[in-house]
Image (cartoon, rainbow, N blue to C red):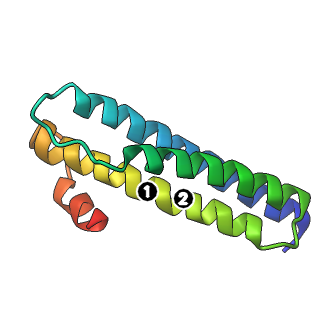
Amino acid sequence: MSAHVAMRLAWSLCALSLVMTILSVLLLALNYTHPKTHVYGFWLENTVLPISFSIIGAVIATRLPANPLGRLFCAAACVSAVAHLSVEYAIHALLAQPDTLPAGEALAWLTS
């Protein structure tokens, strides 16, 4: 893989995980507005991990494109962002406002 491709891949994964993390925090804020809705207990860890891992991975991949560690950090950030987004989406779709968003049960299955 060339240095340019590795750099573009790392920053693309970084941007994707940051966007998913922002969306999950917005859903978390919406879930907080419903007083009887269960809030996922590990929301802080699942917010900090994708942000830090994606930025660290993109910087490593930019500076050392031959090192796969940067791409692994970016991939771990994306996996964590998907998990956080899916759990917040499932809580919102199934508990906060039932039957307003599609595929709530599928995303609940994904997070379990």
Give the Cα separation between the discs numbered 2 and 1: 6 Å
How many marks the image carries: the answer is 2
Q: Vertical placement of 48 versus 72: above or below?
A: above
Q: Name the residue under label 1.
A: 82
Q: Position of residue 108 (x, y in %)?
A: 22, 60
Q: Which labelled disc corresponds to residue 78?
A: 2
The front one of 105 and 112 is 112
Q: Which labelled disc corresponds to residue 25?
A: none
Q: What residue type is labelled 2?
A: Cys
Do the CB atoms of the residues marked 2 and 1 lie less than 8 Å apart?
A: yes
Dot 1 lies on which element? Answer: helix
At x 18%, y 44%, the residue is 93
Q: Which amino acid does label 1 sit on?
A: Val
Q: Vertical placement of 33 versus 54: above or below?
A: above
Dot 2 lies on which element? Answer: helix
Left or right side of 92 for 71: right
Q: Position of residue 88 (x, y in %)?
A: 30, 46
